[in-house]
């Protein structure tokens, strides 16, 4: 799994939030053996898309790709959740996935 951490620049305003994000979320929850990093990414992307958390979604789409999910699998998951979480949420998520896939393809 790629190294994850809270944005360093947030330490000046919210040092405790950065600390628990790094120590609890990324160093504990994401490392638990019950789910693979790939599966955790699929769950995370699905929830962020369903809840319209579009600020966090691009980062986690990138992590999902690095954790072994394909663009096609993420596209299928987003298409599936459109019927449960709403069309606008899915369209926003798929637009972000398209942008990330294009950036990676041209890099």
Image (cartoon, grey):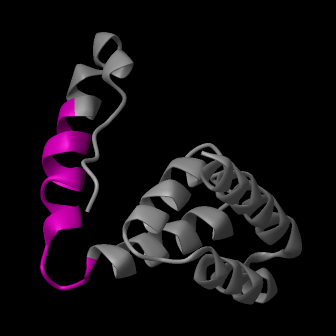
Task: Residue at 14%, 73% (x, y): give it.
Answer: 32
Q: Residue furthest top?
A: 12
Q: Is residue 3 left or right of residue 81?
A: left
Residue 86 location (% of width, % of height): 81, 75
The front one of 1 and 6 is 1
Magenta span has 59?
A: no
Task: Residue at 16%, 51% (x, y): give it.
Answer: 24
Q: How many marks?
A: 0
Task: Residue at 65%, 56% (x, y): give it.
Answer: 105
- Please identify the quarter of the rendering in which residue 41 is found: bottom left
| Relative vertical location of residue 107 with respect to residue 95 in this rendering, above or below | above
| Relative vertical location of residue 50 with respect to residue 7 in this rendering, above or below | below
Report the span colored magenta: 19-36
Q: Is residue 34 left or right of residue 98?
A: left
Quadrant (top left/top right/bottom left/bottom right) for the N terminus? bottom left
Residue 51 location (% of width, % of height): 64, 63
Quadrant (top left/top right/bottom left/bottom right) for the C terminus? top right
**Main structural element of the magenta stretch: helix, strand or loop?**
helix
| Relative vertical location of residue 9 with respect to residue 95 in this rendering, above or below | above
Magenta span has 29?
A: yes
Residue 84 location (% of width, % of height): 73, 86
Q: Is residue 101 left or right of residue 89?
A: left
Residue 6 location (% of width, % of height): 32, 35
Task: Residue at 80%, 58% (x, y): give it.
Answer: 95
């Amino acid at each position: 799994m790629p190294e994850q951490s809270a944005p360093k620049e947030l330490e000046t305003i919210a040092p405790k939030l950065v600390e628990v994000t790094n120590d609890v979320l990324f160093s504990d929850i994401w490392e638990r053996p019950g789910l693979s990093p790939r599966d955790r990414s699929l769950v995370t992307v699905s929830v962020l898309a369903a809840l319209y958390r579009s600020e966090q979604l691009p980062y986690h789409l990138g992590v999902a790709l690095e954790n072994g999910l394909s663009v096609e699998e993420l596209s299928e998951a987003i298409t599936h959740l459109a019927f449960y979480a709403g069309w606008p949420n899915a369209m926003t998520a798929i637009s972000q996935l398209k942008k990330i896939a294009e950036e990676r393809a041209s890099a």
